[in-house]
Amino acid sequence: MKNLLAAPAVMIAAVFAVLFAGSITYAAPNGAAHKLFVSGAFEEAAEAAALAAGAENLALAARATNAKAYLETNNKTARRTAKRALKYAEQAIEDSPVLVEGHLQAAISYALRGARMSPVRAFLSGTAGKARKLLDHALMLDPENAWALSSSGAWHLEVARRAGSGSYGSDPAVGFEQFAAARAAQPENLLIAYEAALRLLAYDEPAARENGLAALRDAVTLAPQDAFERRVQERAIVFQQAVDEGQEAERAYIKAQP
């Protein structure tokens, strides 16, 4: 029972970017809001995107708010921020049920909240199952979406690692496959590289470790495209230093991640 309670508390780290289903055409998000996001003004970006309205802008508002929650160090503040992101994401889904980004940002919001709760509270809130349902819907809309594959892969590996393979429907083999597919689809994506590095190295399996180390090298060396990627790369550099220092430092870094 103890392991089952721990599973939702650390599920998937946020992977943030505007997603569009391959066969569906959407209007671009508000330009001013997007520029604010790129600059790292996440609160202002969310406000501008929400004011512009429309599913794509509401999804951008969720993305910006999730980014702020991800970088927040105070657990209570992070939970509240992720809850606001969930409201934006749900509004985006209501406006356009076929927008992949809406479902993905809602899943990320649940994951961010669960990661900052106590294990018992996270278990009782059902965050793992809610995130899984949203990820499945995103993959149904676009099975080759690299962001959805990365987030889903992280979910499978984290839940399997903490509660055992099969818990909540987790399957490590699926997680490995989805990370490989996400990395192959976007090999120069810094965020996906960092997420793959963190989850593969945390799983601590020899075959996964080689791919995890390769992903970490990419996360450290790829050129950041915006302020959020720069902040994530800073974490990747610290992670690489911990790996270089040795097993104890590496495990301490992984344990400290929400």
Image: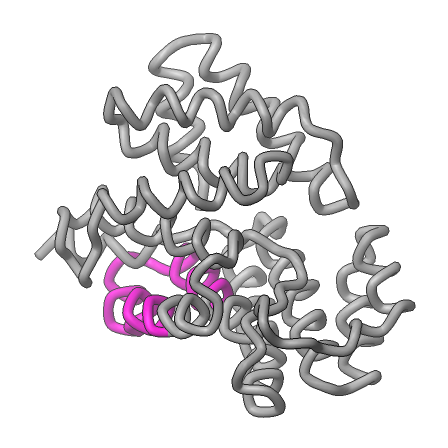
Q: Position of residue 185 (x, y in %)?
A: 53, 44
Measured from the top left, where is residue 19 in percent x and y? 62, 64
Quadrant of residue 69 in the image? bottom right
Name the residue at the right extreme: 32
Q: 179 or 48: which is nearer to us?
A: 179
* Depicted 67 relative to depicted 93: above or below: above
Residue at the image point whose x is 83% and y is 63% from the top: 34
Residue at coordinates 85% horizontally, 73% vertically from top-left?
A: 30
How far across and down, in percent of the image, does residue 105 sit?
55, 68
Identify which residue is drawn at 20% across, 50% down: 171
Residue 81 within the segment the image draws in magenta: no
Left or right, 17 with reference to 251 = right
Figure colour scheme: one colour
Name the residue: 36% across, 28% down.
201
The image quadrant where one finds the N terminus is: bottom left
Which span of residues is magenta-colored? 108-133
* Secondary structure mostly taken by the magenta-highlighted segment of the chain: helix
Residue sitting nearer the eye, 37 or 148: 148
